[in-house]
Image (cartoon, grey):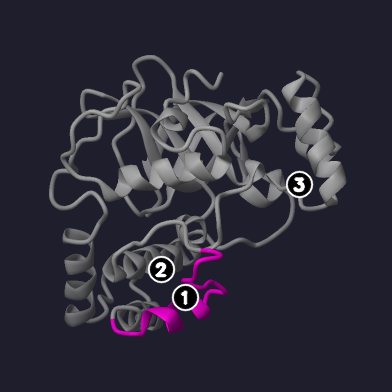
Amino acid sequence: MNERLSIFSVAARGTARGAACAGLALLAACGEAPVEGGTVVIGFEGGALDGSEDAVLEAEAEADAGPNAESGTDPALEALAASYLTLPIDELLASMGLARDEATQMMDLPDETIRQLAIARLRRDALDPDEGGAPERLDDGRLSVRFRHLSLDALDDFEFEEVMDSLMEGEVRFPQEVAAFDEKPVEITGYMIPVEWQRREVTEFMLVRDLLACCFGGAPQPDEWIHVSMEEGKGSPYFPFVPVSVEGTLHIEGIDDGSGYAAGCFHLNGTAAREVR
């Protein structure tokens, strides 16, 4: 499994932190040469891949234009998003329970990229608020799953390590409420970190719970991201810094970090991916 995840060969192989750093490095790169291991880093048409050009200019234009009643824009939401463009970075991070320091920061991202990540998180929460409760069953039988439904936070540290070790040996000892999603068709929303491209489509990517937390809260835990492999012929456009809803079949399986430990525990055979609007 880890041989397919070329992201592990891009960074310091052997840690989940290295894998996440490599993925975020792909976001920050633009127009570089192909990376060893088969991954090609390409530019994103319309601006810098890290969102530091068009995405920020678009946010500024929206703030200057003011709320649009016809589109249903929430004036309070847009005012808050506009404030994110000028609020001191440390204050912006603190308002989200994060900090830019040596203990938590994974990458030295430009301030404007941090602002765009914060705005993306704000809009995601507004577009798709979490009402709590069990997963919703959609009309076609799929389950609308949240990352909190996959969380292993109920386990203490010892139990967590034991579950991960067992998973690497091919045995699923997850809590029943999480194990119930194994081999089930689901739909889940997160953020895309591209791993593999074919022509101009993303064929493999990390779907992470929160890009901003990945940058300033440390590497994502095994239950905070999903390795998505799009089915043959069903590649996805690249959606930078916006929430993405992905459909497919979820599998609980160990993703080797290169040294025998689980860097991840979820794999999804993707059939479709779309931006959440």
Q: Residue furthest left?
A: 46
Residue tagged by mark 3? Answer: 152
Q: Amino acid at mark 1?
A: Leu
Q: Alpha carbon of mark 3 to alpha carbon of mark 1: how far?
A: 25 Å
Label located before the other in sequence (3 or 1):
1
Give the mark nearest the N terminus, 2 or 3.
2
Instruction: Indicate the position of residue 248 as horizontal and vertical percent values.
Output: 53, 28
Q: Amino acid at mark 3?
A: Leu
Q: Is residue 118 left or right of residue 102?
A: left
User: Do the residues under discs 2 and 1 have CB atoms within 8 angstroms?
Assistant: yes
Quick one: label 1, few (<14), some, or many (20+) residues within 10 Å? some
The magenta stretch spans which residues? 86-104
- Tell me if residue 237 is in the magenta stretch: no
Residue 118: image tag: 2
> Quadrant location of the C terminus?
bottom left
Q: For the residues carrying marks 3 and 1, which lies nearer the camera in this image?
A: 1
Q: Earlier in the sequence, mark 2 or mark 1?
A: 1
Q: Confirm whether residue 192 shows in the render.
A: no
Compare residues 22 and 201 and report the one nearer the observer.
Answer: 22
Question: Which secondary structure is most common in the magenta stretch?
Answer: loop
